[in-house]
Image (tube, rainbow, N blue to C red):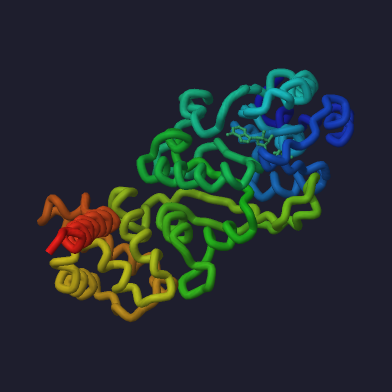
């Protein structure tokens, strides 16, 4: 078959519906694995359209299950679709799809948390980071308990330009619990602004593309679902190591209702806390009485840049963890208390 036009004209032949596939292979959803399926192909088409043009694209679908989204991706004229599914019960149904789309669907029985997509597609797809994104896309509707840790892992990969981003600025279209989708895309000052908003937005352009009501899934989950599209930025908005940004952001948001100086203070050992926090805020030119949700990505950029300089000047600073100090102080206090009560028990 010639490349180009004829590929994009591909349509799957008539097949049993997803509902019939579920019956045929007895694919009842495993509730403990948070399996909620999309059976309506108009809806899966809509999700797939949110990923952009997929003509001749190489697509990595995570958690295909009974294959609703998989069918829509195949009908979008892709060059190749690679799916990774953990639950072996879905493999025969996916094999049926593969037979209906010869040479297009590769099925891997594996775990998306460990699968190495960077080795799976042709090297020739690789683009320079500054170029347009490669024709490689990630699409998926995973259980929420997997999609959130996975996006943190992938954001770290974006920062290092490895993993799925060894191809360049690979785009991702993924589902999350609606509240998580709102956090990922929340703007400065909004109620949903959180750690995830900064971590996603300093590395990617992030768009809440679609909300799907819970009732569209079988069985119906407790919550609605948000489809989020990520495109890595050519230039990250904070140019510091991922772990450093994560540490600053995590410290700030741990006291989300307090002024930001409260959380930032926890970056420093108690003995120098007041002085160092003052210095950090002053050099970064950030108002200490802003609340965490009011800090923009550029505020975080200044804070991370200054904190980095302070870490370079004091090699022990980055390793400092106030929770450790707290634990040590607690055990010291406990020792003192134990000694005290022992002395009280001694005969006069
Ligand atoms: N994408 C399908 C749909 O929209 O109908 C299925 C959705 S269901 C919420 C999630 C799917 O991801 C299930 O098929 C489940 O077995 C699979 N899954 C869960 N954890 C996984 C993992 N770590 N690696 C690969 N697949 C996983």
- 158 in relation to 99, above or below: below
- 32 in relation to 246, above or below: above
Q: Is residue 50 left or right of residue 320?
A: right
> Residue farthest to the front?
347
The spot of residue 138 in percent (x, y) is 58, 39
Q: Is residue 246 left or right of residue 182?
A: left
Q: Quadrant of the N terminus?
A: top right
Ligand 1 visible in quadrant:
top right
Q: Residue at x 78, y 50 (%)?
A: 220
- Quadrant of the image occupied by residue 146: top right
The spot of residue 232 in percent (x, y) is 46, 49
Q: Nearer the viewer, residue 48 or 308?
A: 308
Does residue 321 show up?
no
The spot of residue 189 in percent (x, y) is 47, 75
Q: Quadrant of the C terminus?
A: bottom left
The spot of residue 45 in percent (x, y) is 76, 44
Q: Residue at x 51, y 42 (%)?
A: 150
Q: Residue at x 82, y 47 (%)?
A: 42
Does residue 38 show up?
yes
- Quadrant of the image occupied by residue 56: top right
Q: Nearer the viewer, residue 15 or 144?
A: 144
Q: Residue at x 18, y 73 (%)?
A: 274
């Amino acid at each position: 078959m010639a490349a180009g036009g004829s590929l994009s004209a591909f349509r799957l032949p008539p097949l049993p519906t997803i509902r019939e596939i579920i019956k045929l292979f007895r694919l009842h959803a495993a509730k403990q694995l948070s399996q909620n399926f999309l059976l309506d192909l108009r809806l899966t088409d809509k999700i797939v359209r949110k990923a952009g043009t997929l003509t001749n694209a190489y697509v990595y679908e995570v958690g295909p299950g009974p294959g609703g989204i998989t069918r829509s991706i195949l009908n979008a004229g892709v060059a190749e679709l690679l799916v990774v599914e953990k639950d072996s019960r879905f493999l025969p149904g996916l094999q049926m799809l593969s037979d209906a789309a010869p040479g297009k669907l590769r099925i891997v029985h594996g775990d998306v948390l460990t699968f190495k997509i960077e080795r799976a597609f042709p090297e020739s797809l690789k683009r320079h980071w500054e170029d347009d994104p490669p024709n490689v896309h990630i699409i998926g509707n995973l259980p929420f308990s997997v999609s959130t840790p996975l996006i943190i892992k992938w954001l770290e990969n974006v920062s290092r330009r490895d993993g799925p981003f060894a191809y360049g600025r690979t785009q991702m279209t993924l589902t999350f619990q609606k509240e998580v989708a709102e956090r990922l895309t929340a703007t400065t000052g909004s109620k949903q602004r959180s750690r995830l908003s900064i971590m996603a937005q300093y590395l990617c352009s992030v768009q809440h593309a679609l909300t799907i009501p819970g009732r569209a899934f079988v069985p119906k989950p407790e919550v609605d679902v948000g489809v989020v599209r990520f495109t890595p930025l050519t230039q990250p908005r904070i140019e510091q190591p991922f772990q450093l940004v994560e540490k600053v952001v995590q410290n700030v948001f741990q006291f989300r209702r307090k002024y930001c100086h409260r959380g930032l203070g926890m970056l420093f050992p108690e003995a120098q806390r007041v002085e160092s926090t003052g210095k950090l805020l002053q050099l970064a030119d950030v108002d200490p009485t802003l609340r965490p949700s009011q800090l923009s990505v550029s505020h975080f950029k200044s804070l991370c840049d200054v904190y980095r300089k302070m870490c370079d000047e004091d090699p022990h600073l980055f390793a400092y963890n106030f929770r450790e100090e707290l634990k040590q102080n607690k055990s010291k206090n406990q020792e003192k208390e134990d000694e005290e009560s022992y002395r009280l028990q001694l005969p006069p």
